[in-house]
Structures are given as C-alpha cells and as structure tokens.
Amino acid sequence: MFAQGPQATPSIWAPASTPAHEIYGLSLFVLLITGAIFAVVGGLLAFVMIKFRARESDAGHEPAQIYGSVQVELAWTVIPVLIVVVLFLTTARIIFAIQDAPEPKSALDVTVIGHQFWWEFHYPKLNIVTANELHVPVSTPEQPEPTYLRLLSADVDHSFWVPQLGGKTDLIPNHPNQMWIDPQTAGLYLGQCAQFCGIEHAKMLIRVYVDTPHQFDAWVKNQQQPRTQDASVAAGRQIFETEACMNCHTIAGTVAKGTFGPDLTHLMSRATIAAGAAPNAPQNLRLWIQDPNTFKPGALMPAMQLSDRQIDEVVAYLSTLH
Amino acid sequence: MADQAFPIPGSLDATPSRGAALLEWLHSWVVTVDHKKLGILYIVYALFFLLVGGAEALAIRIQLVIANNHFVSPELYNELFTMHGTTMVFLVGMPILFGFANYLVPLMIGARDMAFPRLNAFSFWMTAFGGLFLYFSFIGGFGLYGMGSAPDVGWFAYAPLTAQAFSPGHNTDYWALALIVSGFGTLGTAINIVATIISMRCRGMTLLRMPLFAWLMLVVSGLTLITITPLTAAQIMLLIDRYLGGHFFDTQAGGSAVVWIHFFWIFGHPEVYVLVLPAFAIANEIIPTFSRKAIFGYPAMVAASVGIAFVSVSVWAHHMFTVGMTSVSNAFFVLSTMMVGIPTGIKIFNWIATMWGGRIRFATPMLFCTAFVFQFLIAGLTGIMLSVAPLDWQLHNSYFVIAHFHYVLVGAIIFCIFAAIYYWYPKATGRVLSEKLGKWHFWLFFFGFHLTFDTMHFVGFLGMPRSIYTYEADRGWSTLNFWISMGGLIQAIAVLIFAWNLIDSYLHGKEAGNDPWDAWTLEWSTPSPPPAYNFAEDPVVRSRRPLWDLKHPQDPDWKYER
Amino acid sequence: MSTIPIFADENWRLPSRGRVGMFSLIIGESAIFTIFVVAYVYYIGRSTYGPTPQILSIPIFNTICLLSSSLTVWMAEHAIARGRIRVFGVWWALTMTLGIIFLVGTAKEWARLIGHEGLTIRTNLFGTTFYSLVGLHATHVVVGLIMLSLVMLFTLLGRVGQRHAERIQVLSLYWHFVDAVWVVVFTVVYLLGR
C-alpha cells in the first residue's frame, strides 16, 4: 500500500506523480488533525460514559443541573475556528499549486474524449489516435516531461481517475477540463471511469503505460505508421470494409474512417479490448465481434451477425494490426 | 340490546361484526386528520420502505461480495443502487422524520393538532402516492433489457445521461414524476410544521422555551421550503427537456450539463441537513433524559441549528470539486464547508457536556444515542477530510464517500431513529418495547454497521469507485468487499429482531403509563397513547422543562434559566 | 398543568397560522422561481442558433394591468375589513378582470411569437427558458384566478362576510406574491435579457 511505483491495487497512498504526491502529503496533515480531534473528543466521550454512569446509590437523586457556561462554550468555538483557518490555508495552497500550475514547454499534450464506454486519446502534436490505453513518458526532476490532459466528452459525463497519478477530473460535454500528471516511475498504472455514465460504467477501465524515453519513442513511431496491406488477410479486410465495421471504426490507410468506436489502426499494440473488459487475445476478439454482450452487456457495439467463417477472417485481419 | 333468539341483521344490531369493526378501523386511518395517526402512518410507511431499501442494499452487497459476480445484470444493478438511494432519502428519511415531527410537535408545544390538519392528511397521501408510483416503475413497462423501468441513472440523475437520447425508456420519468409528487407532500408538511410552531404554542411557551426538538423541526421545515423546491424546479426542467423538446441541459444547443449538477446539489446538500437535523432533535431530547440533566447550552444549540441552516445553503459545490471549477471557486467552497462543520461539531461538545456530571442510564434509547454521538464524530471528521478539495479529487465518487455518507445516514440518522422509536413507542402505543430484544438489536446492528462501513473507507482509499456493478478480481478489493457484505447481513438480522420487537411488544409489552422514562417535556404529561384531543386542559408553561418544574417545586427551572 | 402560575404573557398573542402558512408557501415558491430565473439569466446569449430576445416587445399594458390588480385587491381587503361586502365584491371583480386581461395579453404575445416569429419551447435555448419562466408565472396567475373566482362565487351567493376578512387577506398575499414575481420576471426577461 505504501510502496513506490505502479501497483496492481490503485491506492491513493502509493503516489507516483507530483499531483498525487501533493495530495498524499496534504492528506497526512489532515489525518493528523482529524486523528487528534478524534482522540480527544472520543476520549472525552468514553470518559463520560464510564465516570458518570448511574449507580444503584443514585436512585431518586438528580444530579446538579448545569444549564451552560459561556466560557466553556466560547473556548470550544474558538479552537475549531482556529483549526479551520489552518486547514483552509494549507488546502488553498495545494489547490493553487495543482490547478494553476503553468504548462511547461516540454509537456506532452493529450486530448482525452470520453465515450460510453471507452476512452479516446489524441496526441495532436504527434498525429496519433488511440483508445483505452494511454502511453506517456516518464518524467524525472532532471528531465521533466509532464503530460497535460485535455478532457472532453462525446456524450455524457465521465471522470478520469488513475489514483496513483493524481486526483480525478470530470469529462463533461461542452465543458473542456484540464489536468496534468508527471509519473516518475515507469510501469503500468490502473484506473477507471469515476462518474456513472450508463450501463457499462463499471467496465470503462484505464491503463496508463508510463514509458522510459526509449520505450516511448518506439511506441510513438509505431503508432505513427499507417498499416501496411497484408495480402494474406485481404478477405478479412474486405469484410471489415463492407460489413459496416468501417461505419464506426477507423483503420488508418484504409477507407475505414468511422469515429463512433475506437480507432483500431494499432489494435494489437493494446493489452486489452473493450476498455479493459477482456484481455486482447484472438478468442476474446472472436467472442467480442460475435456478440459484445458476452463481455459488456449493454455496450453500444451491436452484434454484427457475421458467420463463423467471416469472424475468423476478420479476426485474422485485426491480428495483423500491430 | 337485540334479542338473541331472533337476530335482526344489519342496522338494529348494536354489536358490530368483526369484519365491520376492522373496516371501521381501517377507514378511520384512511380519513384521519389527527396528527398522531398521520405521524404513525408516516412512520409505518417509512419503516416498510426501510425494509425495501434494505433489501436493495443486500442485493447490491451480494452482487459485490466477490469480483465478477453474476447475481444481477448490470441494468438491474444500476436500477438497484438508484432505487436504494432514492428510496432511503425520499421514502424513508424524509417521511420518518416528518412523521416524528407530526406526532410530537403538537404534543410538545401544548397544542391539540397541527395548524392545518387537512393539509396534513393531503401531504401524507401525496407522499405515499409518490412512493408507490416510484415502485410501480419496476413493473410498469418492459424497459431496457427486460428489467422493468425503474430509475437507473443514479439518485443524482446527472444530465445528459437523463436526456432522451441516452435514456430513451421511462426510467428517468418515473424518477422525476414520483419525486415531484412526493415533493408537494413534503412542502405541505413543512408549511404545516412552521405554521404550527409559530402560531399554536400554548401559553407561556415562548420560542426560547420550546423543546429543542421543536426548534430543530422549525429550522428543518424552514430549510425544506428552500431545499426541496430547487429539486422540483430542476425536475420540471428535465421533463421539459425530455418531453417538450426543451434545451435546459442540451449541450448542443447551448445548454449546460453543469447547470444540472449545480441545481441538483443546491437541493442535495441542504437536503442532508434536512435529514440530519431531526437526528439532532431526537438526541437533544433523549440524552438529557437519560443523563438526568438539562441540555447544556440551550441558546447555543438554537443558534447553532439556525446557523447550520443558513450556512448549509452555501456549501453545495463541495460535491463538484472535480467538475472543473476555478481554483478560487474551489477554495471558497472548501472554506464554507469547513465553516459549516463548526456549529455542527460544537453540538457534539454540548451533548458530551450534558452527559458530564450526570447519572447516565444506558437504556436502549440511550445506547443508540451514545453510539450516534460517537459515529457522528467520525462522520464529521471524514467530512472534513472530503472538504479538503485536493483530497476530494482522489476520494470523490469512491467508496470512501459512500462510507462517509452512510456514516451520517445510518450511523447518525438511523441510530437516532431507532432511539426515537424505543423512546416514544411507549407514548404512542401504551406499551414499552422489550429491553432485552432492544439490546440484541443494538449490539448486532452496531457491530454490523461498523464491520460494513469502517471497512468501506479503506476500499475507497484503494481506488474503488462507486456505482460499479462489478470489479476486477486483481485490484485487491475482493476481501474488503466480502467483509463489507457480511456486515450488511448482520445489520439485516438486527433489523429483523427490531421488527419482531415492534410487533411482539405491541401485543405483550409491559404497560408504559404516562411517563416511563421520568422525562420533562409536555408529551409525557398525557396518557399513553394520548387521547385525540391531546390535553384535557390547555397547558401553561413557565420554563423549558414544565414537568421538571412540577416534579421539583422547590427547584424549578424558571429560577435558573436565562 | 394549570397549577403552574402565570407570571408573564398575559397577552398571549401569536401570529395567525393562515398568514404564517401563506408566507411559508411563498418562500417555497420563491425558491422555485429563483431556480428558473437563475437558469434564464445564466443562459442569456447562449443560444447557439435561432431567434433572440430582440423579437420580444415589452408588455407595458399587460404589466400595468397586473400590477394595478395588486392595488384593487388591496382596496378589496380594506372594504371587507370594514364590512362593506358590496364594495368588496366590486374591487374583487376588478382584480379578476385585470388578471384575465393579463392572461389574454400573454396569450396574444405567445400567439405572435409562435406564429410569426417561429419561437416555441423547443426552437432553441432562448425559447425554452422564455416559455418556461413566463409560463410558470402564468400558471401561478391561473391558479390565483381560480381561487379568486371561487371567492367571487361565494360572494355572489351571499356567503362572504366581514368575519372572512382575515382569510381574504391571506389569499391576497398570494396575489401580491404573483405580482411581485412578475416584476422580477419582467425585469429579467424584457429589460435585462434584451
């Protein structure tokens, strides 16, 4: 829970990026104060419950009736006010530090578009479009390279939450938002949509791959290549382009330019399909295309009513999209 | 009397048959305008829906007991958590608290009924109809995926998920219409309570001599007037969007999804104060009685309550820290939220100070109230944690928030409701509830509550968001979820014991007499249950504790009260 | 209970429950109107297409009628307080007439907006907010008129007397509220918004 680096459990106590670290530090301070209040007040309550319990000898005698005390009440008003002042000032400082941090020139820009029930990622300066699995470069104090995420929505409200990298920010249609992360340890960080967005909200997962500079360059290069035409899977490609798949999906370098569903140009470079609903393996691809309700009942992709042979050919084609 | 050898059927027989007596009795409940009967109707209605909402919670917990479970479909799950929240707030919380107000306020202020008895009845039946209409949605219409048309958009129903485009069925419509209807009932009762307290106090009962319960109900009702109405307005706007082609929340036409969020929380935040202030009202009556002392700092308690009501309308956007407001706006709401915590927290000190120097009797009502103080302390502290906006950026919409608000709703409010029932059931029925069963109920519920909701904070820290019908097995949330669900089962058993206590004590409980707890406010001067007219003679009071004055003529309160 | 001696409060007079009840209702209704006004104001100028508030013409005559009806209803309150039921009836009927003129004027304005300008509640954001806010107010005028006509009916049947003065005052409070809301709506829609 308190380790460094990426975890399987996306705990807020394992920060790996500056915003998450700032929040972590603040939360320790807050816990200290609330813990102290709990100890004092809880202790008083426990004391009172034990010391002033009725005993048999009390029967019939009422205790002294004390109606109030101005000094006591003043004291226990002033002290909380002081605590609030301290807490507020500390909090305000962190709010400004995170929200109003100016974007450095070295930052990577990513536009995130929330959909029911998947994530679209654009890298405008790099000419890359991908889905569900975000690749960002690791950012070190010597070589800072934060990623600035611009958050938009194509339909309803969503929220981008990867606890180890920072707090969440909502994606609201017609209300662009912004957040930034600067992960300091390479690896895979997990998160998911955190604003109820409909039937498959639970399966709108996020994978953030924090790459070393070398890994990141390789990934970018690969993503920027259009797909070469592999003749052995021409049948599958034909089906893809004629059986309505292209109405929703884009595969760069082909006529498929749909934008309703994820960009599939480099589908095989992703570890999962359907925004994390299943691992990216041929049998899962097969099941997904046959009937998306297998993994994600209510997903907006319809069952395409393809024959078994057609599905095999399409899967073969998609398997070449590295 | 009729000749038994020749029974004359029908009108001349002075002894009604069993069936006729039953019908007569039922009829009296349907047409009643008596505040006591209506209060009981509200409470029984709410307790019924407590069981229903609790069943929904159990279904949720069974679905989440292990990862990737298939107990319910995603669509049904979304309906369950939406209905659980909507039920508990609107069909349990509000009605039961207004039910207690209805029953107790006229008795406590020495009046014979509420200001507007017929409005009172109308309000109850509107609320009841709204609830039944809401539940009709489970069967009314095929809905999506054959799961009925129960609302499935979350109890907060964010736009544009609720637009026709994204919610084409009738689910959202049931939500909006049912709540508009029951909202009118709520408004009627709030008006009634305000008018009753202002205009119908008995001689000598100045506002500053009223029981704190009445004060808090006055504040709650006033707050309700400006709390439930924004929701009604927003729901009307939603229906205009859905059915008349309106564009209030249509982002393509210039409308704004954020405006819905603002309007909802302008209702939603003061609403939680509407729910929790009556819990304070109950504690303000029970803790003094069982500590054998007057409440410590009555004027401060009044001022704090009024202060809370005023400040509570300025904090709503602490539900919106992640929506993308400016840093200055975020900071403002951090400050206002922390500030409302001050008068709220101070009440805890007043309760402890009341117990200080007392002779505390831990009968069942006091057990629940003491647990309430402890749990409300924790709830307030986790609330302070959430008011720290950057921390909220992590914890918003996670299970930490669910833990926090259940700590308030169950740990504070339900515990006080249980306390209130144990305390005033003797007055309403003439019989005392079993202490033995009461203690079983308390300890089981206390244990189950903490098992569930203490654990829940941690699964929130570990990154588990809310409103998800399942979760990945490799996220490390499985064990915690298992124990959370177990706690739910234990609470359910405790509630069943409570239900049994209610029924069994009604039939076999010890007789209560007027004043089983040796208390000091006016309702304890009437028989149990009180007659329809409440008081044989209009009471006249001279202090905050009229019965203390009667019982202690050498040492009456009016000698010391300032 | 009456064994407790009375030391103060010889004149135990509390506000009338009818008045308190009506004030409470007015507070609640004000909150509803506030939300619609806030929505209207926030959305000024944000329609992405369609007719703008420039097509509105300021309803001066209508406003004068409605606001005068507050005066006439006040005269009616005075009359019944003095027991002059006939005079009360006249002022009351005048109030109703002015209210009906207001509604007719609103209907005519809407007919023009819908028929000639093509503005409906679904046309654009301006249409939605305009008809919602003005319509909400008009609905309250209608409800008020229904209550006024009931009282008119009872007056004509000779059932209303000086003893009902208090209740008439409570009902008039509602009517004054409706007029006050119109002042706000008028300012926001026809002055600020254009």
Image (cartoon, helix red, strand yellow):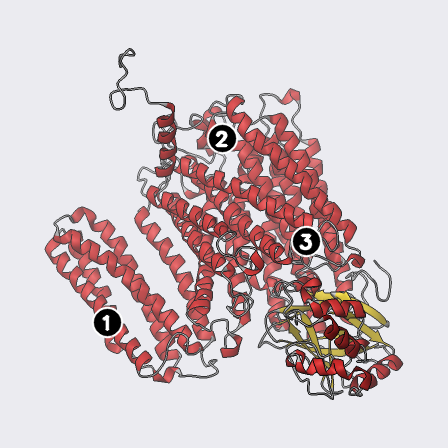
Do the residues bearing badges 1 and 3 touch, measured as CB atoms within 8 Å?
no
What percent of the width, then of the height, locates residue A16? 82, 68
Residue in view at x 48 percent, y 54 percent: B140
Secondary structure state at the residue bearing disc 3? helix
Q: Residue furthest top?
A: B5
What percent of the width, then of the height, locates residue C190? 35, 78
Closer mark to the observer between disc 1 and disc 3:
1
Q: Decide if residue B407 is in sight here.
A: no
- Residue at which label 2 appears: B520
Q: Quadrant of the N terminus of chain B?
A: top left
When the figure is inspected, residue A139 is found, relative to residue B423, above or below; the finding is: below
Closer mark to the observer between disc 3 and disc 2:
3
| Residue count near mark 3 (Cα–Cα under 10 Å), binned few <14, some 14–19, many ≥20 | many
| Residue count near mark 1 (Cα–Cα under 10 Å), binned few <14, some 14–19, many ≥20 | few
Determine the chain carrying the residue at label 2: B
Viewer-closest of B48 and C40 = B48
- Residue at which label 3 appears: B382
Is residue B456 shown left or right of residue B273?
right
Secondary structure state at the residue bearing disc 1? helix
Is residue A197 shown left or right of residue A34?
left
- Residue at which label 1 appears: C104
Cα distance in 3D space between marks 1 and 2? 60 Å
Residue type at the position of mark 3: Thr
What percent of the width, then of the height, locates residue B80? 59, 52
Is residue B260 shown left or right of residue B193?
right
When the figure is inspected, residue B391 is found, relative to residue B342, above or below; the finding is: below
Residue in view at x 54 percent, y 71 percent: B257
Secondary structure state at the residue bearing disc 2? loop
When the figure is inspected, residue B41 is found, relative to residue B17, above or below; the finding is: below
> How many dots with numbers?
3
